[in-house]
Amino acid sequence: MRTLLVPLCAAALLATPVLATSAFGQDRPEISVERKDAVIRDAFPNLDEQWAARLVPDETMRVCNEHANEPPDDLFEEIRERAAASIVYPEDGTLMGDWKKGEALAQSGYGMRFTDYPARRETGGNCYACHQLTPQEVSYGTLGPSLLGYGKLRDFSDDAVKAAYEKIFNPHVVYPCSMMPRFGVNAVLTPEQIKDIVALLMNPESPVNQ
C-alpha cells in the first residue's frame, strides 16, 4: 500500500496545478496596513485604555510596518538616531550587575500578559525563547543567534559591555526594525535588570562564557 501512495500523490499534484500553486501562496492579494490594523483592533474588543494603547504603533513601528521591516536608507538612519536618543543609562554609571540575577531573568517569561495583571513579581526577559545562552540550558529558541561565549568572543571589553546594554535597551540602535523586543524603552525591564542580563553575557564568571 505504501508504494502506491507516492505515485498517486505525485499524479494528483501534476493533475491540479492551480491547487498546487495556491497552496504555496503565490498569488496572495496585497493587504493594506490599515486593514491589518483594523483586524488586530477587532480581535481585541472591549480592551481597557492601558491595553488598547498597546495596539497603537509608535513612529518606529509604523515605519517598519509600512516598509515590511526594510525601510529605505534615510528612514533607516532616522530610526537608529531615535533609538540612540531613547537610551537611559543607570544612575550609578555601571552597566553590569549580577549575572545570577541575569540568568533568572533570562529564564523568566513572566509579565506583560493578560494573566500577569495585577503583577505579582518582576517581569522577566524570556531571553531563552529566542537565544541559546548557557550550555547547561538545553531548551531555547533559535529566532536569535546563539550567545554562547558572548563576552569571551568580545574580549570582555568595555565597549562590548556598553553595546550589549544599548542593544537590550533598544535594539533598533543596532539594527532598525529588529525583531528583538525593545526591553528598556518599552519599560519591560528596568535599567537595573538590563545590567543583570548584561552581566550574564559579559561577566567572565558567567556560565555563558565558560
Image (cartoon, rainbow, N blue to C red):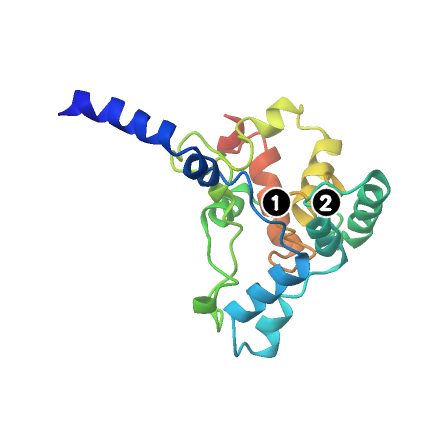
Give the Cα distance between marks 2 and 1.
Answer: 8 Å
Q: Secondary structure at mark 2?
A: helix
Give neighbour class at mark 1: few <14, some 14-19, many 20+ (Cα, 10 Å): some
Decide if residue 123 is on the left or right side of residue 4. Answer: right
For the view shown, which residue lies furthest in the left direction? Answer: 1
On the image, the x and y values in percent for residue 161 come to 69, 36
Give neighbour class at mark 2: few <14, some 14-19, many 20+ (Cα, 10 Å): many
54 up-or-down from 151: above or below: below
Q: Amino acid at mark 2?
A: His
Q: Earlier in the sequence, mark 2 or mark 1?
A: 2
* CB within 8 Å, label 2 to label 1: no
For the view shown, which residue lies furthest in the front direction? Answer: 15
121 up-or-down from 193: above or below: below
Residue highlighted by disc 2: 172
Q: Mark yes or no: residue 95 visible.
A: no
Nearer to the camera, 76 or 133: 76
89 up-or-down from 23: above or below: below
Which numbered tag is attached to residue 7?
none
Nearer to the camera, 69 or 108: 69
On the image, the x and y values in percent for residue 125 come to 53, 50
Q: Secondary structure at mark 1?
A: loop
Nearer to the camera, 26 or 160: 26
On the image, the x and y values in percent for residue 131 come to 51, 37
Residue highlighted by disc 1: 180
- Residue at image position (70%, 45%) is 177
Q: Amino acid at mark 1?
A: Met
Nearer to the camera, 5 or 195: 5
| Total numbered circles | 2
